[in-house]
Image: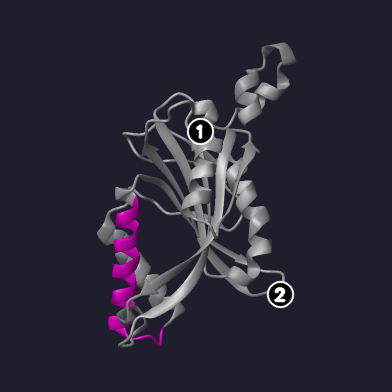
Amino acid sequence: MAVETTGAAAPPLWLDLPAGFTAIDLDEDPGDRMARAAEQLDALFPDTGAEQKLAAVIASETALQAQLREGAVHLSSCLVRAGDGEPVHGVFAVFLRPQDLGDPGGYPARVAAELAEAWPDADVGVVELPLGRAALAARELTVTTPGVVWGVAEPSVGTVRQLELLIPHPWSPHVVAAVFTTEDIGHWDEWLPLIATAYRGISLHPPRDESRDALPPEQWDKVRKAFG
């Protein structure tokens, strides 16, 4: 599935997402989005109380608005079936963050070193992607969910695993940050191929017209063909 990011103030990106990644319409009216989310909750959890459903919808929209303020240009809900048949869920977000990159060529290694120092428990490194070299960090985070979301008095505390990719935009003073988060840590090894596919699918160019393949090779736009 190829999708274009939103966000008028940021340079566009195109994403080729694997099956199970469903894009959230960031331009949709928040009221319409919340109403649709409430309908989905009614269908999936008919026995859940109205107050609990309302709290869940509000919490979800509040989180989405916070991500938009942080520069999110794409959000996907990731729902797949693991090898044991269990449905597992994650969230894939792409941010374009204005930033003074310094030397763009040295950015990935420099940032990886900074993240390794800031997050000593994280797995940090530099990877090569079609878009270029990127810093990559995987870590576990403790998150607190207000009790009202689940219809209880006390908040719940859980652990999520997050994989964050950071790459300098080659012709704009922005950093592309692609972040995958899931509570289904036990299936992490099964998530990795899907996350890698999503990361490799980030492109600076729209999908090519397949009719180009009928042209002689000397007439191909080699840069666009390389990026897809």
Residue 210 horizontal side relative to residue 175, left or right = right
| Residue name at image x 43 percent, y 27 percent | 102
- Rendered residue at 40%/39% (across/down): 96
Residue 157, percent from left and from top: 42, 77
Q: Who is closer to the viewer here, 89 or 48?
A: 89
- What amino acid type is highlighted by mark number 1? Tyr
Residue 145 horizontal/vertical position (percent): 37, 74
Q: Residue at x 65, y 56 (%)?
A: 192
Q: Position of residue 91 (x, y in %)?
A: 49, 59
The residue tagged with tag 1: helix, strand or loop?
Answer: helix
Quarter-of-image position of residue 210 = top right
- The residue beneath circle 2 is 84
Q: List the residue tagged with mark 1.
A: 107
Q: Which color scheme is applied?
A: one colour
Graded by Cα atoms within 10 Å as few (under 14), some (14 to 19) or many (20 or more), the crowding at tag 1 reads some
Q: Are marks 2 and 1 in contact (CB under 8 Å)?
A: no
Q: Position of residue 134 (x, y in %)?
A: 56, 38
Distance of label 2 from label 1 (alpha carbons) = 40 Å
Task: Answer whether residue 165 is visible to the viewer in this image.
Answer: yes
Q: Amino acid at mark 2?
A: Asp
Q: Between 162 and 80, which is closer to the camera in this rendering?
A: 162
- Tell which tag, 2 or 1, sits nearer the viewer: 1
Could you classify mark 2 by the number of other residues whose Cα lies within 10 Å: few (under 14), some (14-19), or many (20 or more)?
few
**Residue visible at 47% across and 35% down in the picture:** 13
Residue 4 lies in the magenta-colored region: no
Identify the magenta region: 46-67
In the displayed structure, 104 sits above or below 151; it is above
Q: Is residue 50 magenta?
A: yes
